[in-house]
């Protein structure tokens, strides 16, 4: 295993938020999975990928993370309100 995927994660501000992602070619397949043949066939007519690939999300928030983020936001809002 290498850290290539985790080290490729970047972010940039966009109107109304932040965009987070990776420029690695396999990042989308890792995050969302892929069905057999989803990317067509190789030069010998074999499907790419040759079998189903399950999603292995590396980006996003777990339920616990989401709860923690909401708690931080709520504390910030309450602090701003006095």
Image: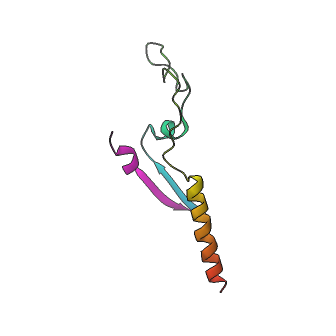
Residue at left 54%, top 30%? 34
Residue at left 44%, top 37%? 26
Closer-to-camera residue (16/71)? 71
Residue 21 counted in the magenta span: no
- Residue extending farthest to the front is 64
Looking at the rendering, which quadrant does residue 73 occupy?
bottom right
Residues in magenta? Answer: 1-14
Closer-to-camera residue (27/65)? 65
Q: Which quarter of the figure is the N terminus placed in? A: top left
The spot of residue 11 in percent (x, y) is: 47, 57
Q: In this view, does 8 lie above or below 17?
A: above
- Asked whether residue 15 appears in the rendered view, the answer is no
- Residue extending farthest to the top is 44
The spot of residue 72 in percent (x, y) is: 58, 70
The spot of residue 71 in percent (x, y) is: 61, 68
Q: Specify whether 13 is left or right of 77.
A: left
Q: Which quarter of the figure is the C terminus placed in? A: bottom right
- Asked whether residue 51 appears in the rendered view, the answer is yes
Q: How many labels does the image show?
A: 0
Residue at left 59%, top 58%? 66
């Amino acid at each position: 295993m290498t850290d290539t995927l985790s080290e490729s994660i970047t972010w940039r501000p966009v109107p109304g938020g932040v965009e987070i992602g990776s420029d690695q070619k396999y990042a989308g397949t890792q995050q969302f999975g892929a069905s057999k043949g989803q990317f067509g066939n190789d030069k010998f007519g074999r499907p790419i990928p040759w079998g189903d690939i399950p999603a292995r999300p590396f980006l996003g928030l777990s339920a616990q993370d989401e709860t923690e983020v909401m708690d931080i936001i709520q504390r910030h809002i309450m602090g701003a309100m006095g």
